[in-house]
Image (cartoon, rainbow, N blue to C red):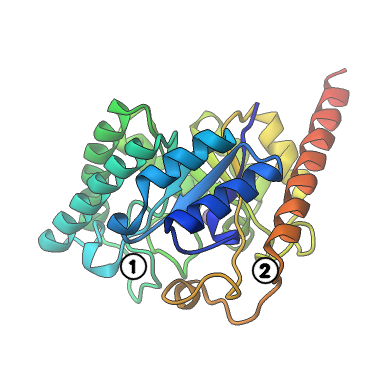
């Protein structure tokens, strides 16, 4: 059974004890199985409060991270690569300490718009770092998801096919693809086909519509997305991700290009996403079950 998750930034971009308590309690109240927490500032993340609230609300956790330009492990630059590796290894310690099952996001390059393509040397360096990070994650039973994102957020993995090749080169059983239908809608010729191509290598999934607002209110073809997930018997987490400057501030607002808000009411958005996802999954199971009969 897929665990359904909610990105913490639907509630808050900070993680003080009060923020953690509010986000975790609210996510659990809506019937989600897990919260995806994210931070650039590892030291500002309150571990004891997180553990206490997860336990109190019987909620699971996953984490996502990104790298800044001066920590870019795909840059081919020794110093930056070294800083990126150190950050990712510290991030694995944090993920282990809060009991995260998965760590996902743009773990393989900086999280930014690039002006030039990645080099072969840069990709090799990135793969070597990710392999060492994965070894540390494996010791804590953590699966890594390499998130395939659109061209404006990285120049390394923009399509599922690129990510399949990358993950195969990392050669670690706990390194998988993380696909996101918002990004796939921009880059893939056929999102459902990309999911089927990923197959057993898919380890994490983000839902989001074409404008990152309410699920189903954009142009993403969700029936075909959920049928594809069902057809490959995907069992990993499915996490809803949506951003509004009503919650997130800079620098994320600028990197993601949030110039207009599609929602202000976090709870209404998250409750709707949960109901929408439940219905889509049920419909996909019925559709494929009927096909098999
Ligand atoms: Mn995503």
Depth check, front residue: 142 or 292: 142
Residue drawn where x is 83% and y is 20% of the image:
292
* Quadrant position of the C terminus in the picture: top right
Where residue 291 sits: x, y (%)? 85, 25
The residue positioned farthest toward the left in the image shown? 78
Where residue 80 sits: x, y (%)? 17, 62
Depth check, front residue: 15 or 87: 15
Q: Which mark is residue 211?
A: 2
Q: Secondary structure at mark 1?
A: loop
Q: Give the spatial CA distance, label 2 vs label 1.
A: 26 Å
Can residue 45 be spotted in the picture?
A: yes
Badge 2 crowding class, 10 Å Cα cut-off, few under 14, some 14 to 19, many 20 or more, is some
How many numbered marks are there?
Answer: 2
Is 182 left or right of 132, judged from the image as shown?
right
Residue drawn where x is 42% and y is 46% of the image:
49
Can residue 203 be spotted in the picture?
A: no
Depth check, front residue: 197 or 147: 147
Q: Which mark is residue 117?
A: 1
Q: Secondary structure at mark 2?
A: loop
Depth check, front residue: 145 or 265: 265
Is 9 left or right of 255, judged from the image as shown?
right
Is 286 left or right of 186, judged from the image as shown?
right
Which of the two marks, 2 or 1, is nearer to us in this view? 2
Badge 1 crowding class, 10 Å Cα cut-off, few under 14, some 14 to 19, many 20 or more, is few
Residue drawn where x is 51% and y is 38% of the image:
54
Q: Is residue 254 above or below residue 181?
A: below
Residue drawn where x is 44% and y is 54% of the image:
17
Where residue 65 sits: x, y (%)? 38, 54
Where residue 78 sits: x, y (%)? 11, 59
Badge 2 or badge 1: first in the primary sequence: 1
């Amino acid at each position: 059974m897929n665990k359904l998750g909610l990105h913490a930034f639907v509630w808050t971009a900070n993680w003080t004890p009060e923020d953690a308590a509010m986000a975790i309690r609210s996510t659990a109240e809506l019937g989600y199985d897990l919260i995806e927490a994210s931070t650039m500032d590892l030291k500002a993340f309150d571990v004891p409060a997180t553990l206490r609230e997860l336990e109190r609300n019987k909620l699971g956790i996953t984490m996502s991270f990104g790298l800044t330009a001066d920590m870019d492990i795909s840059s081919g630059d020794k110093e930056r690569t070294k800083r990126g590796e150190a950050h990712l290894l510290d991030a694995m310690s944090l993920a282990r300490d809060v009991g995260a099952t998965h760590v996902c996001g743009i773990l393989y390059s900086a999280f930014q718009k690039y002006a030039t393509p990645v080099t072969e040397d840069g990709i090799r360096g990135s793969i070597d770092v990710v392999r060492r990070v994965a070894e540390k994650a494996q010791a804590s039973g953590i699966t890594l998801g390499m998130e395939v994102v659109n061209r404006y957020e990285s120049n390394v993995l923009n399509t599922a096919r690129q990510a399949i090749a990358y993950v195969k080169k990392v050669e670690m059983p706990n390194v998988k693809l993380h696909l996101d239908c918002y990004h796939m809608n921009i880059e893939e010729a056929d999102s459902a086909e990309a999911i089927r191509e990923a197959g057993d290598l898919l380890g994490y999934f983000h839902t989001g519509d074409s404008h990152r607002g309410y699920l189903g209110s954009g142009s993403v073809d969700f029936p075909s997305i959920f049928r594809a997930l069902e057809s490959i018997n995907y069992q990993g987490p499915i996490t809803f991700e949506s951003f509004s400057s009503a919650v997130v501030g800079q620098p994320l607002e600028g990197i993601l290009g949030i110039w207009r808000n599609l929602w202000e009411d976090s709870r209404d958005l998250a409750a709707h996403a949960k109901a929408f996802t439940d219905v889509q999954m049920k419909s996909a199971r019925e559709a494929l079950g009927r096909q098999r009969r």
